[in-house]
Amino acid sequence: MKNRFAFIIGILALGASVMASAQVSEDIPGPGQGSAQPQEQAQSEPSSSVARISLTHGDVSTQRGDSGDWATAALNQPMVSSDKISTGTNSRAEVQLDSANILRLGDSTLASIAGLARGQIQVQLERGLIDYSVFKGTEAQVEIDTANAAVRPAQKDGIYRIEINAEGETLVIVRKGSAEIATPQGNTQVEKGQMAIVRGSGDEAQYKLAEAPSRDTWDSWNSERDRLIYEAHSWGKTNRYYTGSEDLDAYGRWVTVPVIVPFSST
């Protein structure tokens, strides 16, 4: 228990460091910049972020983007842009990209974090099944890519199920919110309760809309995970931008302690 608590505190500290660096880059002019150039500062690139693996079940591995090395995933392991995560048979994983964007992988799934910044997130699904949840208050524009489609959540509060089946089709189910599906043949809007099926590749990719299938055990598990994270009591005691605070609920309770200032005669 002590080791797990130390991991959580470490992740919170890492989030604080990232947030602090993002604040500095936004508020302090760089070399050659001054207060007379607000538009140029506003157009600067978003600050990079760090995700964390918040749950593993079964065979879960990660690949570092800078080295290409695969290794067994660890709970609370940080992930950055260009890293990949893979699950084996009967395995699952959850990655908190930030406080409001959650990626979950079903079994036999491979996904990569193509871009991870405070204002922009891009995920690439290479095979398998994922759930992508967006909570209220997100600051990021999100895109989830497959070989024949790009999925862009259109609302700041939604649940999206994306799967690549054995035929290579992309299935996009909107459980909550709405999403824009982009293919070489054009774009379409998918609303809550609908499913988009994208077939083919390249210029031959085609899509059609249908009624979403009924919820199954995968959907129920994801809904329960969303509830545990979103309703955690610890969010009221910490900055919500720091991922991992919800894990503290299982290890005790919050107590307010008065600060005692030492007396000084000088």
Image (cartoon, helix red, strand yellow):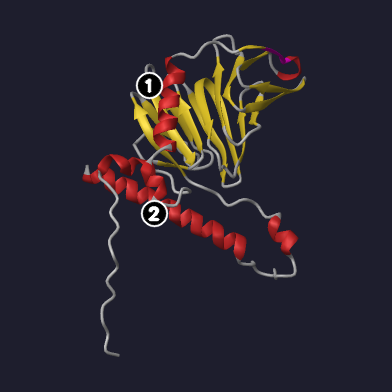
The N terminus appears in which quarter of the rendering? top left
Q: Residues within 10 Å of mark 1 (few under 14, many from 20)?
A: some
Q: Is residue 255 left or right of residue 112?
A: left
Q: Mark 2 points at which residue?
A: 13
Magenta segment boundaries in residue numbering: 205-209
Q: Position of residue 150 (x, y in %)?
A: 66, 27
At 40% from the left and 51% from the top, the residue drawn is 238
Q: In this view, does 70 lie to the left or right of 98?
A: left
Q: Mark 1 points at which residue?
A: 91
Q: In this view, does 73 lie to the left or right of 20?
A: left
At 52% from the left and 31% from the top, the residue drawn is 133
Q: What residue type is labelled 1?
A: Ser
Q: Earlier in the sequence, mark 2 or mark 1?
A: 2
Q: Where is residue 260 in the image (x, y as percent from the top left)?
A: 27, 71
Kindly report the distance in space between the C-alpha atoms of the residues bearing marks 2 and 1: 29 Å
* Residue 93 located within the stretch drawn in magenta: no
Q: In this view, does 6 lie above or below 114?
A: below
Q: How crowded is mark 2: few (under 14 residues within 10 Å), some or many (20 or more)?
A: some
Q: In this view, does 30 lie above or below 129?
A: below
Which of label 2 and label 1 is nearer to you?
2
- Helix, strand or loop at label 1? It is loop
Q: Where is residue 52 in the image (x, y as percent from the top left)?
A: 42, 40
- Helix, strand or loop at label 2? It is helix
